[in-house]
Amino acid sequence: MSFAYEHRGHRPIPRAQFVRRFLAHVAIAIAATVVSIGLGMAGYVHYEHLSATDAFLNVAMLLGGMGPVNPPVSEGGKLFAGLFALYAGLFFIAVAGILVAPVAHRVLHRFHWDEKER
């Protein structure tokens, strides 16, 4: 499936095709989230020696914008937690953009589409 969006001179895509496009964006967002959770958990397990469930909780809280549950105690853990917190903030914005892009494009495309001119 191509992620190229239609030009403003082209007719908006049918609803079924739009739903497929949106679901593809959702799949990308889910895949990126799963990879981020895995990398974050690996970092917490390695640097802070947390259990998998505690590492998951910390990563989920950071990716969700809440902050870590277990404060880091090692120097490596503190550095990892700080960098992962910065990453999590940017990740949230990126995933929001991935999910909003097809909807915003559809709305703006329909707003500017004029059936009479075509």
Image (cartoon, rainbow, N blue to C red):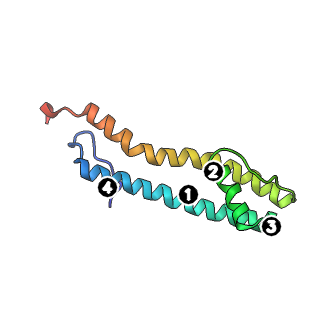
Residue 93's place in the image compared with 39, above or below, is above
Lower sequence index among marks 2 and 3: 3
Secondary-structure class at tag 4? helix
Q: Which residue is mark 1?
A: 33
Identify residue type, mark 2: Leu
Pointer 2 with pointer 4, Cβ within 8 A: no
* Mark 4 burial class by Cα count in 10 Å: few <14, some 14-19, many 20+: few
Left of 65 or right of it: where is 81? right
Q: How many marks?
A: 4
- Residue at 48% of width from left, 44% of height from top? 97
Q: The N terminus appears in which quarter of the rendering?
A: bottom left
Q: CA distance from mark 3 to mark 1?
A: 22 Å
Residue that appears at 32% across and 40% down? 106
Q: Residue at x 38, y 57 (%)?
A: 24
Disc number lying in front (3 or 4): 3
Which numbered disc, 2 or 4, marks the residue that appears first in the sequence? 4
Label of residue 49 in the image: 3
Q: CA distance from mark 1 to mark 4?
A: 20 Å
The x, y position of residue 101, in whole percent, is 41, 44
